[in-house]
Image (cartoon, helix red, strand yellow):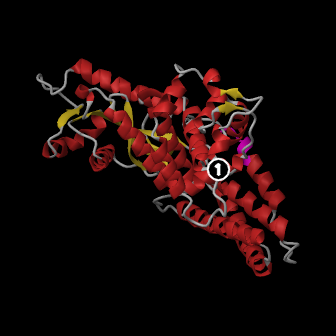
């Protein structure tokens, strides 16, 4: 993937010039032409200071692919195809001619991993600052704040379903590796599965039936955890290749999660209250976030606080935990000020009304909606308040639907964070830049 500047700008006999394929008035080309590519290229070069790659790919091409992926919101395999056949994609990568080129999708994944969250944050902040500079003077410093949850693609959890997932994983580990380590275990997989299927078929199980099912599942889990631990410990002693070491390390982390789930479920069965309860075996960092909405009262994912200033969307606090909206507002204001963004006025809903005194101390115009009787002389007129609030809700709908944040399918915490940051970059490039 090493390209010289001559090969990037060179003309070949059969290639078509990209100026003819991507016209000047094309919206994506206008955005790409106005970006500071020297600064973006410098960030890409910084990402390869480690010895992760012996030969780092061309920073201009890879950064072009990163920006294009933020604008297009496509899967990595679709990006691989676009690199070969899409004129806008090749224009973003800095080529001057359209011809068939190849780039493996794993190179794009590794580039993002090597960039890391810090460098992606730098790119996001750089684009945010450029968007704020283009904001009209009357809109500068006027922010509309709200929180939303970007949901992870996990099934709605129940105690029985969670324990069944753990049991199935442990049985699979035992059956796959017990012959290799010369062990033989009776895991009762068929019996446990038949019991669970019979329980699922019941339309309205009583509390007594549910409690009985939980008790039997806990017994199966206790047996399978001990058996899987014996198998994994024996497997670690005989590993030879790097692949085996990596696999055994993953199995050990999964075993620790299984033990934690068993302990929590046993405590719940005995009537104790558990904080930070694991609700997903494959995504243990995900927490239930109660929102109290009619359609779906509880959501599972990343809760974020965001503000919109003019057309620019800025990201504040983000966490898997259900933080209080007022605390999110305070942290978001501090984040905005640390970045050098002006904060003169803050508009928000009733959930932030605990921040009235804080806004007064910070000399910020209070535009938060209050509960109870409203004052006759408001700080912000009702029409402007509603307009700003509608703009914020519209931004949430756009970023979720257009940039694929309705159900995040990332398998790790890093994947979720990167997906949110890329969506913010794409939103600002498309609507505010």
What residue is at 79 percent from the left and 61 percent from the top? 172
| Vertical arrangement, residue 93 with respect to residue 262, above or below | above
- Rendering quarter of residue 84: top right
The residue carrying mark 1 is 109
What residue is at 70 percent from the left and 61 percent from the top? 216
| Magenta-drawn segment | 199-204
**Element marked by disc 1:** helix
**Does residue 256 show up magenta in the picture?**
no
| Vertical arrangement, residue 128 with respect to residue 179, above or below | above
Camera sees residue 413 = no
- Tell me residue 13's x, y (percent): 77, 30
Which quarter of the image is occupied by the C terminus? top left
Camera sees residue 168 = yes
Q: Nearer the viewer, residue 90 or 315?
A: 90
- Tell me residue 139's x, y (percent): 26, 28
- Mark 1 neighbour class, 10 Å CA radius: few under 14, some 14 to 19, many 20 or more: few
What residue is at 76 percent from the left and 81 percent from the top? 237
| Vertical arrangement, residue 336 with respect to residue 13, above or below | below
**Does residue 200 show up magenta in the picture?**
yes
- Tell me residue 428's x, y (percent): 44, 33
72 displayed left or right of 433: right
- Rendering quarter of residue 243: bottom right
């Amino acid at each position: 993937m090493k390209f010289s500047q001559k090969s990037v700008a060179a003309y070949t006999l059969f290639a078509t010039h990209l100026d003819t394929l991507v016209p000047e008035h094309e919206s994506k080309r206008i955005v790409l032409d106005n970006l500071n590519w020297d600064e973006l290229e410098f960030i890409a070069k910084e990402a390869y200071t480690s010895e992760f790659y012996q030969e780092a790919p061309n920073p201009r091409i890879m950064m072009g692919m990163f920006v294009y992926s933020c604008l297009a919101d496509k899967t990595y395999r679709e990006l691989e195809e676009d690199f070969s056949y899409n004129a806008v994609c090749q224009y973003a990568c800095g080529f001057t001619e359209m011809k068939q080129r190849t780039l493996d999708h794993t190179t794009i994944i590794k580039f993002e991993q090597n960039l890391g969250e810090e460098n992606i944050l730098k790119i996001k902040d750089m684009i945010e600052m450029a968007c704020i500079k283009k904001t009209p003077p009357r809109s500068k410093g006027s922010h509309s704040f709200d929180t939303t949850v970007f949901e992870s693609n996990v099934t709605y959890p129940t105690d029985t379903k969670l324990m069944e997932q753990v049991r199935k994983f442990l049985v699979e580990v035992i059956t796959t590796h017990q012959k290799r380590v010369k062990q033989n275990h009776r895991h009762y997989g068929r019996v446990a599965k038949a019991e669970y299927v019979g329980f699922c078929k019941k339309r309205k199980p009583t509390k007594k039936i549910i409690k009985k099912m939980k008790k039997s599942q806990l017994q199966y889990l206790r047996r399978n955890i001990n058996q899987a631990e014996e198998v994994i410990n024996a497997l670690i002693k005989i590993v030879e290749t790097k692949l085996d070491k990596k696999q055994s390390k993953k199995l050990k982390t999964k075993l620790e999660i299984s033990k934690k789930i068993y302990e929590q479920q046993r405590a719940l069965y005995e009537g104790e209250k558990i904080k930070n309860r694991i609700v997903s075996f494959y995504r243990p960092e995900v927490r239930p976030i109660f929102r109290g909405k009619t359609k779906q009262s509880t959501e599972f994912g990343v809760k974020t606080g965001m503000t919109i200033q003019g057309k620019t969307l800025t990201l504040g606090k983000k966490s898997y935990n259900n933080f209080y909206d007022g605390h999110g507002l305070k942290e978001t204001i501090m984040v905005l000020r640390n970045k050098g963004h002006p904060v003169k006025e803050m508009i928000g809903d009733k959930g932030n009304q605990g921040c009235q005194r804080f806004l007064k101390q910070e000399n910020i115009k209070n535009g938060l909606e209050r509960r109870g009787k409203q004052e006759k002389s408001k700080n912000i007129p009702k029409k402007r308040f509603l307009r700003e609030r509608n703009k914020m809700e519209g931004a949430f709908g756009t970023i979720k639907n257009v940039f694929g944040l309705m159900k995040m399918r990332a398998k790790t915490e890093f994947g979720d964070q990167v997906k949110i940051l890329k969506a913010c970059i794409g939103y600002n490039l498309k609507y505010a830049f």
